[in-house]
Amino acid sequence: MSKYAVETKLKTIELYKKGLGSRQIQCNLNIPSHSTIDRWIILFKKYGKAGLITKRTRKKYSGQFKLEVLNWRKEHNESYQATALKYGISNTGIIANWQRAYEEGGIDALFIKQGLM
């Protein structure tokens, strides 16, 4: 379950449209991190309301896809957030996990199915 209700995210967008910045919205709605608000704004701009709805299914990614994402991120020197947005990945932490796995175990680590170690 998402930490924040869709209504809270939509209220954030409403305040943003009224001209408030992410730090002002952070104080107004008592949200601990302004970067969370920035992410919601980016998702809303790209996907509309659907971008703010947390999906309940766990998507599985192929090793080839993980490698493509990491290579693109390195080649373009992009943040996890920008990379996630480009590839439609809802959780930036997933990419960080892939990066760590790659650094610790090499390419093979990206092709190991979760829970089979």
Image: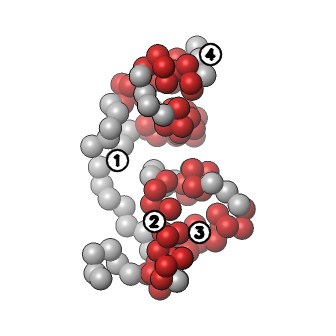
The location of residue 83, given as percent across then percent down, is: 60, 56
- Cα–Cα gap, marks 4 and 2: 35 Å
- Looking at the rendered image, the disc whose residue lies closer to the viewer, 4 or 2, is 2
The location of residue 117, given as percent across then percent down, is: 29, 82
N-term-proximal mark, 1 vs 2: 1
**Residue at image location 29% in from the left, 49% down from the top:** 56
**Residue at image location 28% in from the left, 81% down from the top:** 116
Residue 77 found in image quarter: bottom right
Up/down of 73 relative to 39, above or below: below
Residue 59 found in image quarter: bottom left
The extreme right residue here reads 76
Secondary structure under tag 3 reads helix
- Cα–Cα gap, marks 1 and 4: 29 Å
**Would residue 80 appear left or right of 89 to someone viewing this image?**
right
Pointer 4 local density, CA inside 10 Å: few below 14, some 14–19, many at least 20: few
Which residue is labeled 3 in the image?
70
N-term-proximal mark, 3 vs 4: 4
Quadrant where the N terminus sits is: top left
- Cα–Cα gap, marks 1 and 3: 23 Å
Up/down of 106 relative to 18, above or below: below
Which residue is labeled 2 in the image?
97
**Residue at image location 60% in from the left, 22% down from the top:** 21
N-term-proximal mark, 1 vs 3: 1
Which residue is labeled 4 in the image?
19
